[in-house]
Image (spheres, rainbow, N blue to C red):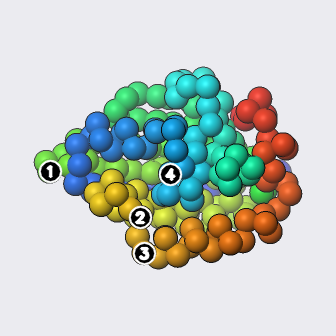
Amino acid sequence: MSDNKFAEKQIFRVFIKAPVETVWSELVKTTKPRPFFWNATWDTPEMATGNPFRMVSGGGKMVAAIGKIQEFEPPHKLVHSFRLTATEDVPSTVTYTLKEVEGGTEFSVINENVPAGSKAEKSKSQGAQFIVKNFKAYVETGKVTFGAQLMLAMFSLMAPMTPKTMSADNWPLEKAE
């Protein structure tokens, strides 16, 4: 956006009945699709500060987002840039914080530097709400909510209609910002 105005910082928080190490492990797992991330998988050489990543789905055929890991402090903090591949919006910043509290972990998703009025603004707000709700369900029960299961099934059926701009061929890891 030309005027560089950003939306207010968005903070989404949830209590998860699990130890902080368990929550962290599930958040940064790179070996299989994560249903709370719309069945996408972290694609990165290593979860470490400075490394690029892609959120890859559809058996490696689609890239929903790209970014670069800015801070990696196990098991309490992960910060990365984030750009949706389906929009022309500039990258924003996503921060995940995990705080050990009595009986479990306080998990937060914080969206910052999202251009006000951009396509990404509404998408990131809805996306963060989906993540916290379904991440909690997944860590506590081993599966996402019923509503998320239906949504993921619909996405799977609609995969052939995914915009070509999201093709993994268009988003090699080197393009991550």
- Please say whether residue 95 is visible from this viewpoint: yes
Instruction: Give the Cα separation between the discs numbered 4 and 3.
Output: 15 Å
Tell me the residue that label 4 is attached to.
34
Measured as percent of width and height from the top left, residue 97 is found at 38, 42
Earlier-in-chain disc, 4 versus 3: 4
Tell me the residue that label 1 is attached to.
103
Earlier-in-chain disc, 4 versus 2: 4
Measured as percent of width and height from the top left, residue 99 is found at 28, 42
Earlier-in-chain disc, 2 versus 1: 1
Mark 4, secondary structure of its residue: loop
10 Å crowding of disc 2: few (<14), some (14-19), many (20+) = many
Instruction: Give the Cα separation between the discs numbered 2 and 3.
Output: 7 Å
Mark 3, secondary structure of its residue: helix
Instruction: Give the Cα separation between the discs numbered 2 and 1.
Output: 21 Å
Query: Image quadrant of residue 45?
Result: top right
Please name the amino acid that badge 4 sits on: Arg
